[in-house]
Amino acid sequence: MMKPIINYKNTFNFDFFKIRKLAFFVSFFLILLSLFFFYKKELNLGIDFIGGIMIDAKFDNNPDINQIRADIDGLSLGNFEIQEFGSPDNILIKLEKQDGSESAQEEAIKKIKSVLPSDVDYRRIEYVGPKVGEELKIMGFKAIFFSLLAMFAYIWFRFDGWQFGLGAVIAVIHDVITTIGFFAITQIEFNLASIAAILTIAGYSINDTVVVFDRIRENINKISDFRFSKLLNKSVNETLARTMMTSVTTLIALLALISLGGEVIRGFIMAMLWGVLVGTYSSIFIASPLITLLGYKSTKEKNS
């Protein structure tokens, strides 16, 4: 029988538990910095949330989106988005709400039509009011809240300890807050794709954390002569190679997308890049040490 070239379980022996206080301080600082910029600079909300104009345009041939973007930019109508919609010859234009009454919105639509070919088929022209944008914002944050609640309940049930559930959710909340702070600091547009990015980051982070927790549960059942803090450290080290390989391969894919994916998904990918980094950090340095901080003890420690 062939032996593996590298035994990953014995490759690493870092004392993560020893530096937990430093990790908590770094996380606390990141959260404070994120909240500061969130309230100081606020988010650069996109049309989905602040309202605006949506134009669904069908072309006879595949349009040059970069040229259309340059033409509309020259109209000085404020922030706008252009993306393919269903097929390469169909584009969706989103324009921020114009100052003034309904006539100001109609004037902006006329200006956009003036820089597009005359044979364009306008399938849909809609005005998204601020009320609809506010409803979308509330629905987006409800989605984040209920996903966190479901994660807490599932992990509590699976690992038979509320400390596991709460530790995992706190780590995810840490990732969500710092990601929102990332949007506030960079002023990357925050839209529905950003909500999707946050939910994806939460899923990625919880997946990494569950892998570590699963190894902790295995070691609790197999090892009886370790104190729980040492068992946590052993479990994190045993899953470290897997965690790092997952993060690196995901980052490679994201870097390829940010280079080749274009402007439409750039904000989503930038958020994911940050999310993968902070999610990997929190699953290693935050989630596991929180279990002991929240008062969880192994059976051996309870009986001693």
Image (tube, rainbow, N blue to C red):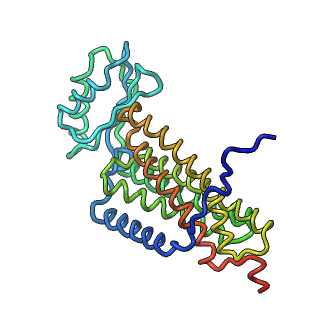
Where's residue 188, x and y in %? 33, 48
| Residue nearest the viewer, comparing 41 with 186 | 186
Where's residue 28, x and y in %? 43, 71
Q: Residue furthest bottom?
A: 304
Relative side of 73 to 44, left or right: left
The vertical placement of 71 against 117, above or below, is below
Quadrant in which the N terminus appears? top right
Residue 178 visible within the image: yes
Q: Which residue is located at x 76 percent, y 83 percent?
A: 302
Which corner quadrant of the image does residue 30 belong to?
Answer: bottom left
Which corner quadrant of the image does residue 67 belong to?
Answer: top left
Relative side of 76 to 178, left or right: left
Where's residue 261, x and y in %? 41, 32
Q: How many marks?
A: 0
Q: Which residue is located at x 29 percent, y 38 percent?
A: 80
| Residue nearest the viewer, comparing 184 with 260 | 260
Where's residue 182, x and y in %? 37, 56
Residue 125 visible within the image: no
| Residue nearest the viewer, comparing 113 with 292 | 292
The vertical placement of 64 against 229, above or below, is above
Quadrant in which the C terminus appears? bottom right
Q: Which residue is located at x 27 percent, y 29 percent?
A: 69
The vertical placement of 116 against 203, above or below, is above
